[in-house]
Image (cartoon, rainbow, N blue to C red):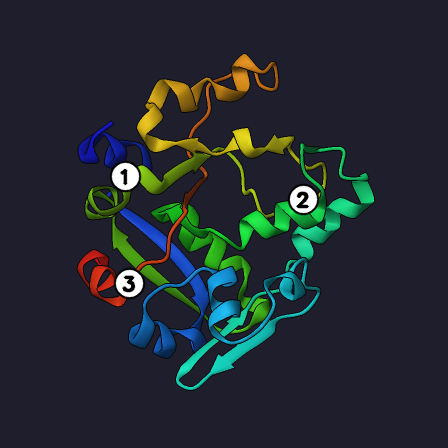
Amino acid sequence: MDADAFARRVGDRLVHVTLAENVASIQRHGLLRSARLAVACGADPELILLRSEAVLLSKGDLSARLNHQRPMRAGRAQDSAFLDGHTLESWAAQLDKRRFFWPDRRGQAFAASLQDRGAQAVLELDSRRFFEAFADLIDLSPINSGSAMRRASPRGDWIYVPVMAGWEAFATNRQERGLTRTRDSVVEVSLRSDISLNILSRLLA
């Protein structure tokens, strides 16, 4: 897959949704993963796992309010049967080591659905430049991997397909596991990296 093929699958823009109050710190430090933010602010990353309320992390001019993880905590009611090779805690830990993005239209809808959590900001990134900067660290998912609401879709590490594995590997991933009858499309894009301020400034659309 190259940058143009990636854009054909996810659209020209990717969206990252965050609380509006986080934007000023992002403009100073870039887009950091939750686990990295915890360490940078002197907190134990394990203490932010499966948070039932929003958590404020702050040190100096670095500040971030992390959204609660109630959609993931809802998995307790399903005895975590939807998780392959993970507990709820270990799944939450790997979520905190990623930054998540959405194809543009899905991202706008996602932001609208979070208004009850406070004012939301939508960062729009050029998908081709995003690919060129991070191709080896991008994973594709056919589900919102941070939600276990209602009847949670089965998932394990395999739900994240590296973009460089190619489109066929992603589109048929769940089909080949007998979990779906149809080919998948991209619901979520995740990045196994922080985005420095220097790079972020080049990616913003």
Q: Crowdedness of circle 2 by 10 Å Cα count: few (<14), some, many (20+)?
A: many
**Distance (Cα) linking label 3 and label 1:** 16 Å
What residue is drawn where x is 49% and y is 53%?
Answer: 110
Q: Crowdedness of circle 3 by 10 Å Cα count: few (<14), some, many (20+)?
A: some
Residue 135: assigned label: 1
Q: Quadrant of the N terminus?
A: top left
Residue 179, image x and y in percent? 61, 19
Residue carrying label 2:
148
**Distance (Cα) linking label 1 and label 2:** 28 Å
Tell me the SS state at disc 2.
loop
Give the answer, above or below, for where 201 lies relative to 187: below
Residue 86, image x and y in percent? 67, 38
- Frontmost residue, 15 versus 86: 86
Q: Crowdedness of circle 1 by 10 Å Cα count: few (<14), some, many (20+)?
A: some
Residue carrying label 3:
196
**Distance (Cα) linking label 3 and label 2:** 30 Å
Residue 82: assigned label: none
What residue is drawn where x is 43% and y is 74%?
Answer: 22
Residue lying farthest to the bottom in this orientation: 60
What residue is drawn where x is 46% and y is 25%?
Answer: 184
Residue type pointed to by label 3: Ser
In this rendering, position of residue 93 left or right of residue 201? right
